[in-house]
Image (cartoon, rainbow, N blue to C red):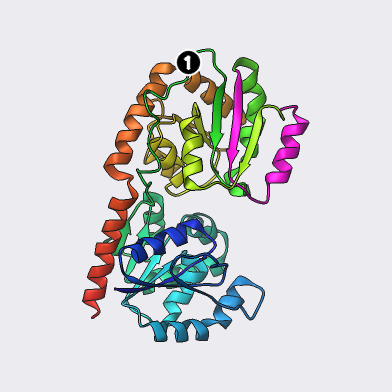
Amino acid sequence: MRIAFLGDGSLNHVRRWAGYFSERGHDVLLLSFENVDGCPFDAKRLKRNFPTKMLGYLSSLGAVRAALAGFRPDVLNALYVTGYGLVGALSGIRPLVVSALGSDLLVDYPSRIYHRLQVRYAIQKADLVMTDADNLSDLAVSAGASRNRILKIYMGVDETTFHPPEGTGKQEHGQRRTIISTRNLYPLYNIQILVKAAPAITDHIDARFVVCGDGPERNSLERMVEKLGLSGRFVFRGSLSAGQIADELRKASVYVSTSRSDSTSVSLLEAMACGVPPVVTDIPANREWLSDGENGLLFPAGDHDALAAAVARMIEDRELAGRARTVNTGIIRERGLWSENMARAERAFMALAEEYS
């Protein structure tokens, strides 16, 4: 197949998605208004003639159409419903797949009328809408998609990289515990809550905190850590490769996600695959994977006291932590593997290409 992608080329999710099809032997072209340097497949950065995203995207619609006409795709996949989804819908290429990545429907869609108009137009023009969580599927339906045009595909984990450590992987009682976050340092992920919870955690537990990821809030988080006298407890690793993240996870006692909003979190799936007991915000997408008190703990988003209590419980309740390790690695094998989920996406793309050939 010849598959064209419209999406933010600087995002790992977009590169990973397009890269799968390239590795499978399909002809791939990624068109992006963001950085595409280092893409291991054919990728082109488009020029925006206006500084704002929407005007910039629409002003380059002619260039998008010209590039697509030259490539002659069998399928066009726009990743992110707002912006790229609208451009894909206006390109005239069929079949069109629009993939929701989370914030486009969870944050953008309810926030502004012009976002709602974009989302509805893109989704109603799409031949297939791809989501990775039930809450995204429900929002796609509310925007005009029929259930039979929605395919839920998880951005799963590579089991050759993300897997439990050799042996039990448990830390012995009395050792310093490692609490890890692998979310990027953006407001949506609310890492401040972990910093605020740290004093209550360290009052009772000898713990260190490893923060993997980068973003605009790093400096303010480091200042906050210093102000609270926690500099010796926190390590900011910055952006790491998948293998490095997996290594950090396998050394951790508890995984924490403080995100205010999410679809299926790949970071959570990676932690589950590595056997790290999770403590995460009580939001719908997390509840697709975790049952509170069974294979993880959920706490109200923004409540640092509840987070501190949940982390302490997970560390002290060895039976719960052990059950979470066992159950979660099984859940990932059952429905969270990258290769199996992407094989379903590939079959769906091939069916669309055949239907429109």
Residue name at image x 37 percent, y 66 percent? 144
> Quadrant location of residue 284?
top left
Residue name at image x 33 percent, y 45 percent? 336
**Can residue 302 be seen?**
no
How many C-alpha atoms fall within 10 Å of the one at disc 1: few (<14), some, or many (≥20)? few
**Can residue 134 be seen?**
yes
What segment carries the magenta color?
Answer: 206-230
In screen coordinates, is 43 left or right of 34?
A: left
Q: Which residue is mark 1?
A: 172
Whether the magenta-drawn stretch holds residue 219 is answered as yes
Q: Is residue 273 above or below residue 112?
A: above
Q: Is residue 313 above or below residue 249?
A: above
Q: How many marks?
A: 1
Residue name at image x 39 percent, y 52 percent? 155
> Quadrant location of residue 152?
bottom left
Task: Residue 280: give x, y in percent of width and height.
Answer: 49, 35
Task: Residue 217: give x, y in percent of width and height.
Answer: 68, 47
Whether the magenta-drawn stretch holds residue 300 is answered as no
Disc 1 residue type (three-letter): Glu
Instruction: Please name whichever residue, 163 or 275, is drawn nearer the observer in this view of the structure.
Output: 163
